[in-house]
Image (cartoon, rainbow, N blue to C red):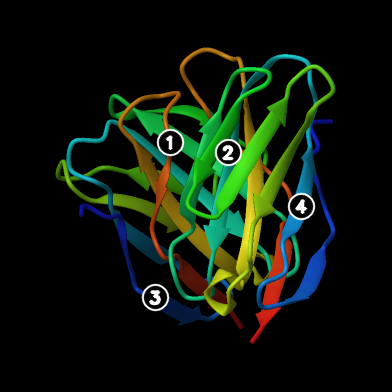
Amino acid sequence: ILNVEQSPQSLHVQEGDSTNFTCSFPSSNFYALHWYRWETAKSPEALFVMTLNGDEKKKGRISATLNTKEGYSYLYIKGSQPEDSATYLCAFTLNAGNNRKLIWGLGTSLAVNP
Amino acid sequence: EPEVTQTPSHQVTQMGQEVILRCVPISNHLYFYWYRQILGQKVEFLVSFYNNEISEKSEIFDDQFSVERPDGSNFTLKIRSTKLEDSAMYFCASSGQGAGEQFFGPGTRLTVL
């Protein structure tokens, strides 16, 4: 069974705190790891797509790392702001031809208090 | 910036009725997907579509479900006879490459009574 686990399930932080979440996924037959940010009533927004072991990507105050050998990825938010409040979802794709369905975790719900 | 759109945003239907959920993917994309999320559960893959045919479907996507790209711009998901357990948020996504980033619409919340 292909399973993606995310932790923690929810997180409350104060404005200015830095935080991080974990995504674990099966390491065999791996192709890519995706991080999405999802605010209620909006489209899930792609943050990062990572494919190589050791990949590190950054977008503003948000960054992510990837370890494909042990099957985990971290998402970091530096200096959290109230507008960072959202659900952060990770998903991975298998190395299986040209079809890349996303297999999802349950998400981490982040609330940043002003 | 191009975006994926979905209509309606919310659909309420009676059990046993047919529903059609509509999506307009990004215009130059070639790969199309439907996912759904039942409240409190993980997002689940339903079906992928490429070159005018289904390329993969999940166990959820049984004979009650079908997809169509009728006119080169719309991508529709039809549920022939809805069940209570079909109540979920349905997301459409498109991608320019099979292995590339998938762009999502805002979802259609389907409520089956």
Q: Quote the CA–CA distance across marks 4 and 1.
A: 21 Å
Residues marked 4 and 1 touching at CB (< 8 Å) = no
In which quadrant will I find the C terminus of chain B?
A: bottom right
User: Chain letter of disc 2?
Assistant: A
User: Chain letter of disc 4?
Assistant: A
**Vertical relation: A1 (above or below) A17:** above
Q: Amino acid at mark 2?
A: His
Q: Amino acid at mark 4?
A: Phe
Q: Residue furthest bottom?
A: A114
Q: Nearer the viewer, residue A2 or B51?
A: A2
Element at label 2: strand
Q: Residues within 10 Å of mark 3 (few under 14, many from 20)?
A: some
Q: Quote the CA–CA distance across marks 1 and 3.
A: 23 Å
Q: Quote the CA–CA distance across marks 2 and 3.
A: 25 Å
Q: Quote the CA–CA distance across marks 4 and 3.
A: 30 Å
Residue to which mark 3 is pinned: B9
Disc number placed over residue A34 in the picture, else none: 2
Report x, y in % for residue A44.
49, 58
Between disc 1 and disc 3, whose residue precedes? 3
Disc number placed over residue B101 in the picture, else none: 1
Residues marked 2 and 1 touching at CB (< 8 Å) = yes
Residues marked 4 and 3 touching at CB (< 8 Å) = no
Is any part of residue B5 visible from this angle?
A: yes
Q: Amino acid at mark 3?
A: Ser
Is any part of residue B61 visible from this angle?
A: no
- What residue appears at the point 76 percent right and 75 percent down from the top-left corner? A13
- What residue appears at the point 52 percent right and 12 percent down from the top-left corner? A97
Residue to which mark 4 is pinned: A21
Q: Quote the CA–CA distance across marks 2 and 1.
A: 8 Å
The reply to whether label 2 and label 1 mark residues of one chain is no
